[in-house]
Image: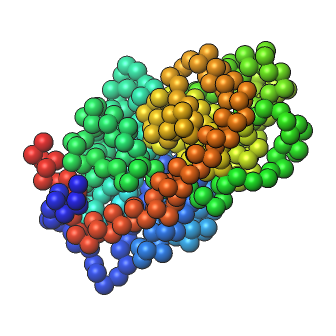
Amino acid sequence: MPVSAVLHPDPVSTVSSAQSPHVVVGITSPQTCLVLAGRLRAMREAGFRVTLVSAPGGLLDQTAAGEDVESIAIPMKRAIAPFSDCLSLLRLWRMLRRSKPDLAEFSTPKAGLLGSVAAMLCAVPVRIYLLRGLKLETASGLKRRLLLATERLAAACAHVVVCNSESLRTQALALRIAPAAKLQVLGNGSSRGVDVERFSPGCSDVRSKLGISPSAPVLGFVGRLTRDKGVPELVEAFEAILMTEPEAHLLLVGWFDAADDALDEPLRVRILNHPRIHYTGLVADAAPYYRALDVMVLPTWREGFPNAVLEAAASGIPVVTTLSTGSRDAVVPEVTGLLIPPGYPEALREAMLGLIRDPQRCRRMGHAARVWVIKHYGNDRVIGLTVDFYRKLLASMVPVGGAKAQAD
């Protein structure tokens, strides 16, 4: 849909053309900075003045310095905390009122809600809610209803909801989080794409460092180690694989995330003590680890658009992931990888076994995956779409979906 077709003037504020447009990008936890690399710099190089906002942490400072943008630390808790959340909302409101940005983009559940509300109260001219995923998909009962209400409120406060994938947009529409005119997908999805030069096929010393034979089958996972990422099913499926493929290894590149879907203590101990499971913790550069894999596995229950799948594909590695929201957009079934239902260790085992027992198929899929990613998800293309979209919004000084959204 052309931007001009759904724009209408904001009656409160205007964007100054005499200086660089000021863009505030807000997230809840500093760990989300891991997916912002390159994106903030591209906005700055496009002529925006960029301020990154998140809860305090080393990654906030490192990312701001690396991307050469401003940063502001505002305490925010990921869990529901009414008193703390009210304080965070007040601090966000004060920050926005003082800095007077032309465009505010907030994402992740807590910052998405509080930041969007604060931006509306401050009448920020262009307000974006970047929907990176739906936490409510793995919640139930009162918690699910509460999360749905917060998603709807965040969307209502924004002029446009940018969805990370087409399936995420479909789910958001089905849940009535926002009207169709307000829900946008840029290009083929993803918030930043992938650096296809950094993530590429090549040699790696990871196997030798970990004492893994060059001929051993290596399955890998990259990301937060949580229940919602399907780690319990992955460990169960891997242990079943060892019964017929005793030389196989499982490489877990990530960290035990202290979220509300954190792994329980017995499973963490089991992982750390397993002779065939290699746990790395958070790594500064995952590229060499992808090159050490035969198959990348992401048995997730929910996603927005998984960056790890794009990184593996760009590295020439086939992927096994699920039919869940977001993840199903990141694989071309039977071409770049395999899709299975979430929550089925047996289906996961069969998919992984089928690939590690057929190296030629793995190579064919890995080659196709890299070609596909280069065509659709190079970070220059994906980030360029975001920059162009935001530039059009700022030039028009108006929100997307306004008139039609009100009619709906």
As drawn, the residue found furthest toward the bottom would be 18
In this picture, is 295 found above or below 313?
A: above
Q: Residue at image x 42%, y 49%?
A: 189
- The part of the image, by quadrant, that contains residue 26 is bottom left
Q: Nearer the viewer, residue 353 or 102?
A: 353
Q: How many marks?
A: 0
365 to the left or right of 268: left
Q: Is residue 342 visible?
A: yes
Where is residue 262, by image quadrant?
A: top right
In this image, 45 relative to 237: left or right?
A: left
- In the rendered image, which quarter contains the N terminus? bottom left
Of 96 and 140, which appears nearest the observer? 140
Q: Position of residue 193 (x, y in %)?
A: 51, 54
> Residue at coordinates 73% horizontally, 40% vertically from top-left?
293
Residue 322: image x %, image y %?
Answer: 52, 29
Residue at the spot 50% in from the left edge and 38% down from the top edge: 332
Quadrant into which the C terminus falls: top left
Q: Position of residue 146 (x, y in %)?
A: 34, 30
Check the image and report above or below for 332 versus 395. Answer: above
- Estimate the x, y position of residue 179 in percent, counting from the top left: 21, 42
- Residue sitting at 40 percent across and 44 percent down? 165
308 left or right of 189 in image: right
Colour scheme employed for the rendering of this structure: rainbow
Residue 273 seen in the current view? no
Quarter residue 337 falls in: top right
- Rendered view: 219 above or below 90: above
